Amino acid sequence: MKTRTLFISGALILFTGFIGLSFRPQNSNEFEITKNLEIFGAVYKELNLLYVDEPKPGELMKTGIDAMLQSLDPYTVYYPESDIEDYRFMTTGQYGGIGSLIRKSGEYVQITDPYEGYPAHKAGLIAGDVIVEVDGKSVKGMDSDEVSKVLKGAPGTKVKIKVKREGESSELERTLTREEIKIKDVPYFGMIDAKTGYIKLTGFTQSASSEVKAAFTDLKGKGMKQLVFDLRGNGGGLLTEAVNIVGVFVPKGTVIVKQKGRAPNTNYTYPTKDSPLDTEIPLVVLVDEGSASASEIVSGAIQDLDRGVVIGQRSFGKGLVQQTRNLPYNTMVKLTISKYMTPSGRCVQKLDYSNKDKGGKATVMADSLLKKFKTKNGRDVFEGRGVDPDVMVNRKTYSRIATVLYTQNIIFDFATKFHRENKSVATARDFRVTDNIYQEFLKFASAKDFTYKTASEEKFEELKKTAEREKYFTGAESEFAALLKKLQPNKEDDLMRFKDEIIDFLELEIVGRYYYQNGKIEHSLRADEEIQEALTLFSDPARYSSILSGKNTGKK
């Protein structure tokens, strides 16, 4: 109670001319807080009175607050009134706008993915369209965040957009009516084969568990006998939704997660509250380095309860819980209040923000200090490293040329051209880049100015610098030059050497032009290594059972 009173008093200092406190704290911690608030207020007052340029109070205060919070952890964040809508989107998946992803492209912003069925799509805007004006004002030089803010607005309001489209001689003008845009937590679900269902979960907003339940029920009606539940790239969200999702697969009343904080009122235990939909169906959960927070609650609980097999790569390692607190003038702070523990008692948090190194970076606990915990069936699991998969599948890597073609938008631009010249293609699942299409791409890419270095070339440069430093380079210049010539990339050769990788990117980008986000996901299932591993596991029930019993480690 004393602490709360102190913070209220501190706020009065900041907003009423920095009047000194009329009481003396009862312990040293309160004294330190009071002293530093007085110092902060005094500095703020002197800046306001004497700084050479007129200070901007709002920006100055936000800078100070942001710097203070950054000394703690990256998840403790202050939201001014102007950013409250962004936070609402994170928790609900909803915003008022036109329904499209955009990105910076040269001096303008370009539409990359219009959401099917929303205003941008209904108005005929397509991927590749360059936005040149919004409501009669040029957006030249604006970044994607700035353009996004002017495109967003209250549902029902209108916004006029002018775009430049490749192949069109004049600019196109469209008037769109903004809608309430709800980004689905389950963007896709379907049957991989006659027995195997698939659910992709990309977020944990307020509707996540209801969407998962609806998808699961639909797939059961289509004959699903086993499920692949995909959490890859899912950065998390609401803890309660994670608990509800695990509740689909385990008995009612099962404890899924516990959270422990410094303040007594931040300690909670979360059991499932609803009856499950299926406690027996064989289950595989897919995770990767991008699976964090609520995704780790789900995958960690499924693993700890031996309810399913986790496949993929080690997850991110975020075991911290945040809570929002409303502040004056429609502002808000999201702060870390506790750590969470999965059913075995482990915390998956990887980085220790309370013990930073001399450079101010969070530390990682040494492997030798990590505690071991037991799953329901007695399998060993460890704290402090995220969720380790039961079956590890190495992350797929791509060549330098394939990566450059993708990141420099050469593949994107070819897909735009292809879409303009081809009114339709095969279904999302069946579409393939043929040899003829690839030949078209080779001509297109060859006309583009792009460069890249191979890993071998970079290593060679390191070797050369070492040789020069150790004075071995003199006299060996010709040999080094000859070797460098052999290591330098050849675009024509690499375009054929890494054809399969490049085709993967091409097919996804082209499919997205016709079938949007859902089509991309459906198409990618065909050659997905983790999904193929899941299907192999499902085909061997004995191995599946032995992994969960601890008799088979599942590690490759």
Image (tube, rainbow, N blue to C red):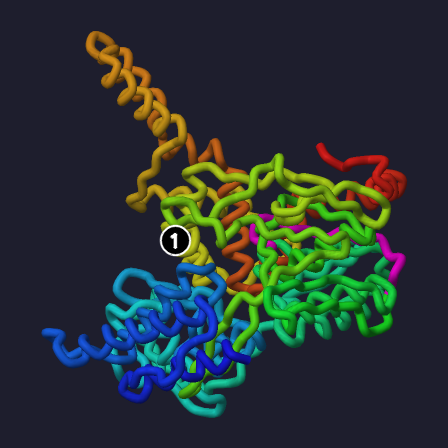
Q: Which residue appears at 35% of the width and 34% of the height?
A: 453
Question: 250 or 176, which is in the foreground?
Answer: 250
Q: Is residue 281 magenta?
A: yes
Q: Please identify the dominant SS of the magenta region.
A: loop
Question: 452 or 549, which is in the foreground?
Answer: 549
Which residue matches tag 1?
A: 409
Q: Which image quarter: residue 151?
A: bottom left
Above or below: residue 6 compared with residue 482: below
Q: Which image quarter: residue 540?
A: top right
Question: In screen coordinates, is 395 left or right of 254?
Answer: left
Question: In screen coordinates, is 115 left or right of 347?
Answer: left
Of all residues shown, which one is farthest toward the left? 52
Q: Residues within 10 Å of mark 1 (few under 14, many from 20)?
A: few
- The amino acid beneath tag 1 is Asn
Q: Which residue appears at 65% of the width and 51% of the height?
A: 287
Q: Is residue 100 magenta?
A: no
Residues rendered magenta in the picture: 278-291
One can see residue 42 in this view: yes
For label 1, the SS is loop
Q: Which residue appears at 69% of the width and 66% of the height?
A: 242
Q: Which residue appears at 66% of the width and 56% of the height?
A: 296
Of all residues shown, which one is farthest toward the bottom? 156
